[in-house]
Amino acid sequence: MVRCADWCVDRGDSGGWSAVMIGVLTGVAVVGGLVYAVGGFNGSLRVRTVDVYDPVKDTWSSVASMEARRSTLGAAVLNGCIYAIGGFDGSSGDISFTYLFIYLL
């Protein structure tokens, strides 16, 4: 889970680092050299978006969203699939560990 909005990625062959912007309380997973930012909080609402950062091209793109809004969630990779686990929906008052979203790549 990422708690701050700015973090850095290694630019590989360029020998430097680059700041990238994602939301707060976002689950993060890396698959095939791409960084996936899953869910999070935009300052007013929990979000269900999934965004992908390509460090080689230095670009962000949006892919299919999760079925539910979640922040403070965990993200893991198994067999090329991203698992978004638990999190908070912004209304229940509890962090739920019963939510599971599987993102097939």
Image: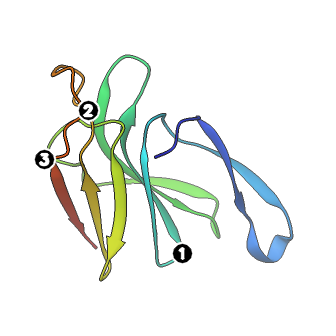
Residue furthest to the bottom:
79
Q: Secondary structure at mark 1?
A: loop
How many numbered discs sit on the rendered protein?
Answer: 3
Sort mark 1 into few (<14), some (14-19) or many (20+) by Cα contacts within 10 Å. Answer: few
Instruction: Give the answer, above or below, for where 74 lies relative to 29.
Output: above
66 sits left or right of 43 in the view: left
Q: Tell me which amino acid carries mark 3.
A: Thr
Sort mark 2 into few (<14), some (14-19) or many (20+) by Cα contacts within 10 Å. Answer: many
- State the image coordinates of residue 8 (x, y, percent, origin top left): 70, 51
Q: Secondary structure at mark 2?
A: loop
Residue that mark 1 sits on: 33
Instruction: Give the answer, above or below, for where 16 lies relative to 39.
Output: below
Residue that mark 2 sits on: 88
Q: Tell me which amino acid carries mark 1.
A: Gly
Residue drawn 86% across the image and 70% down it: 15
Disc 2/disc 1 C-alpha distance (Å): 28 Å
Q: Tell me which amino acid carries mark 2.
A: Phe
- Where on the picture, by quarter, is residue 25? top left
Residue that mark 3 sits on: 98
Residue placed most toward the observer, 24 or 56: 24
Closer to the chain start, of discs 2 and 1, is 1
| Circle number at residue 21 | none
